[in-house]
Amino acid sequence: MISEEIFSAIPMRTWRWLNVNEVKVPENLSAEVRTEKILVESGENKRIVLDRREGGALEVQAHIADGGELTLIYAQLVDEKEAATSRIKVYVGKGAKFSYTTVEAGAKATAAELTVDMAGPDSVADVWGLYFGDGERKIDLNYIIRQGGKRTDANMQVRGALLGGAAKTFRGTLDFLEGSKGSVGREDEEVMVLSDHVQNRSVPIMLSHEDDVDGHHAVSIGKMDEDKLFYLMSRGLDLAEAQKLVVEANFQPVLDRIDDDGLKAEIDAYLQRRLSHG
Amino acid sequence: MAEKKKTYVEDIERTLYDIKNEDHSVYKSHSGLTPEIVRDISRRKNDPEWMTEFRLKSLEVYNSLALPTWGPSLEDLNMDDIVTYVQPDAKMTGKWEEVPEEIKDTFDRLGIPEAEKTSLGGVGAQYDSEVVYHSIQEDMVKQGVIYTDMETALREHGDMVKEYFMTLVPPKDHKFAALHGAVWSGGSFVYVPEGVHVEMPLQSYFRLNAAGAGQFEHTLIIVEKNASLHFIEGCSAPKYNVTNLHAGCVELFVKEGARLRYSTIENWSRNMMNLNTKRALVEKDGLIEWVSGSFGSHISCLYPCSVLHGENARCEFTGVTFASKGQNLDTGASVIHAAPHTSANINTRTISKAGGKATYRSAVKVTKNAPYAKCSVNCESLMLDNLSRSDTLPVMDIEGDEADIGHEAKIGRISDEAIFYLTSRGIDEEEARAMIVRGFVEPIAKELPLEYALEMNNLVNIELEGTMG
C-alpha cells in the first residue's frame, strides 16, 4: 500500500538508520592522528588560529584555567579529494571564556566533534560554526556543550548552506548537568538548501537535569527567501548572483568573527568560487 | 541563604484507577511466548486460518528482532513472565446490564456509561484481553458506520480487516509490533463510509485488571473520502508489584478529504510498560489530529506517526506528558512528508517532577517526493525540581530544497519576570504560579474532551505552599 522507502523512514528505524549517536569516520582516513594541546593559564588571554589545509585526523585538547580566555579559530579548507576529521575537547574553568569560530568548507568527507566541558561556575562558551557542502561532499558534525558549573552561559550558532548532492548531519547538544543552577543556553542552526538533491539532517538535542536553567534551541531549514531573491534580481542581479549574495549575508556573522584579514579574505574567496560553480 | 521552599504540584489522584478486582478470568495463557501459546490463543479466538498464519509469522519476526538500542531501558521486561492472553468471565454484549457486575462497577467508577449517555455516539469497553461491551447509536448504524470489537469485525467484515490489518504497522517494523502481531486480542474497528460525518465522538476504554499480564488491543479505523470522526481512547490499570505490558497497535486510514481526530488519555499504573505503536496514513486533503496525554505507566515509548501520503495532507499533533517519581516517559511524534504541499504542526508540553524523566523524541522526514512540505515543531518543557530530567531529542531528515521546516524547543522553570508581572497586577504569588502552570498546559487542555480536561486539571492542583524554584 505504501512504498518501502516510506517505511524505512519510520521512527523506530529512523533512529537506528540515522545513527544519530555516532559520528561516522570517513573512509580512507589515515590512521595517524595529529595532536595539539593548548593550555591557557589563569587570567591569560590566548588567541589561536588553526588554518587547516591537510586531511587526516586532528585532535585538539584545550584547558582554560580559571579566569582564562581562549579565542580559537578553526578553518578547514582541506583539498576536496581528501577526508578530514577533527576532535576538539575543551575544558573551561571558573569564570573562563571559550570563544570558538569554525569554518568547515573543505574536504570530500568531514567529521568534526567538539566537546566543551563548562565545569567552572560563571564560565562562558560562545561557539559559532559555518559549514558549506556542494558536489558529493559529506559533512558530519557533532557539537556538545556540557554545562556543569553554576551560572554558565553557552551559545551555539551554526549557519550552513548545501548545494549539489551534499549530505550533512549536524547534531548540537546542550547538556545542563545537575548543579548548573542559573545557567542559560541557546542553540540555533540555520540551513539554506539550494538543490533538490541535498540531504540535510539536523538533530538539536537539549538535555536537562536541573530545573533552574533557561535553555532554548531552534532550527530552521529551507530554501532561500524568495522575496529577498526577487528584490535582488529586480536590482539587476541574475539568480546565481542573487543566491550567492544571500548565502554570503547568512555566513557573515560567522566570518566577521575571524579577525585575521588575510584568512578571512581567503575563506571569502574560496566560498565565492565554490558558490559560483554550484 | 536558606533553601527556597518549592511549590508542591500534586501527582494525579490515582485512587479511582487503583481499585483492583479479583481475577475471575476464565482462561489465562501460560506466561511466555511460544508457537503453542500463539496457536492456542488463535484457536480460542476462532481466528480464520490467515490470521493464525499471520500470528505465527509475526512470532518468527519477533524472535528475529533485537530490542531497540535507544530509549528507556527495557531490562525489567521479561517476556517469560508475561501472560499474553487473559479471557475475562464475560461475553461481548451490546447491553450494559448484561456486563458482569464487578466489571460493570469498574467502568461505572471510571464514568464510562455516564459519558455514553451524555456525550458519546458509541462506546467500547475492553477488560483484560477481550472486549466486554460495545454499543453504537442507531442513527449511525443507519448511515453505515461500523463500530465494533476487532473479533466481531474479523468475523463479519473479514475482507476489510484482511485488506488493512497491520499493513501500516507491519510486524517487521519493530520487536513490539511483531509481538502485537502474534498475540493481539481485542480492540476496536471503526468504518465511516464516504461523506458521513460522525457528530458525536466514539470512545473505547481499555482496562487491564490481571497482574503480570499484557494487553495487546488492536484499533483499526478507516475514515472514507470526505467523512469525519472523533475517536477517544482511554487506558488504565490498577497497580501491582509485577510488570504489566501494554503493546497495543493503532492503525488509522484517513482517505481523501477525510478528517480524523484521535484523542488519548493514558493513565496506566506505575508498574506498566507502555510500548504502544500508533500510525496514521493520510491521503490527499485529509487531516489527522492527534491529542495525546501521557500521565501513567512506569515506562512509556509512544511516538504517534503520521504518514502524509497524499497531496495537501495535514497533521496536527498536540501532546502533554507528565512524568513523576519512578516514571520514564519517552514520548513524542513523527511525521513523514511523502507528497507535495503536505503540512504538519507539532505542539507538545512536558512536565517532570520528583525524579521523573520526560523525554520528547521526534522525527520529521521529508522525502524527495514532497516538495513544498511545511512542518513546524514546538516543544516546551517545565521542570519542577532538579531531581528530575527533561530531554529533547528531535531528528529532522530533509531531502530536497523546497521544504520549510522549523523547530523550536524551550526548557526551564517558571520565570521570575512572569511572577513579578502578575503580582504587580494584584494577583497573589501562589495564584500567579498556579496560573502559569495552568497556562503552560492550556494549549493541550483545551483540545481534550471535557471529562479529560477535568482529569488533567488535577495535574495543576498546586498546593499553596512556599514558592517554586
Image: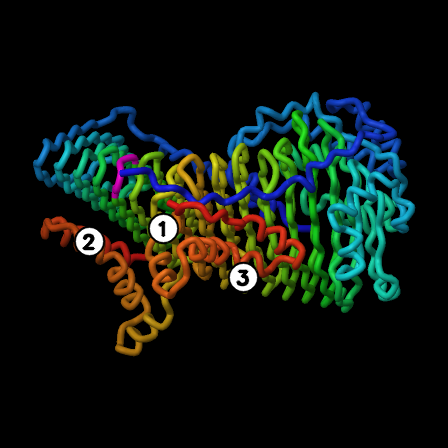
Which is nearer the eye, A34 or B127? B127
At label 3, which amino acid type do we have?
Ser
Tag nearer the camera, 1 or 3 = 1
Quarter the C terminus of chain B occupies: top left
Taking the image as shown, residue B204 lies to the left or right of residue B69, namely: right
| x and y percentages locating residue B316 in the rendered image | 57, 59
Q: Residue furthest left?
A: A44
* Label 2 to label 1: alpha-carbon separation: 24 Å
Dot 2 amino acid type: Leu
Chain under callout 1: A
Q: Position of residue A231 (x, y in %)?
A: 31, 75
Q: Which residue is mark 1?
A: A216
Q: Which residue is mark 2?
A: A255
Residue A242 rendering spot, x and y as whole percentages: 29, 68
Q: Is residue A149 magenta?
A: yes
Q: In which quadrant of the rendered view does residue B236 lie?
A: top right
Instruction: Name the residue carrying label 3.
Output: B343
10 Å crowding of disc 3: few (<14), some (14-19), many (20+): many
Q: Secondary structure at mark 2?
A: helix
Tell me which segment is drawn in magenta.
Answer: A148-152
* Residue under the point 80% across and 49% down: B124
Mark closest to the chain's N terminus, 2 or 1? 1
Visible residue check, residue B282: yes
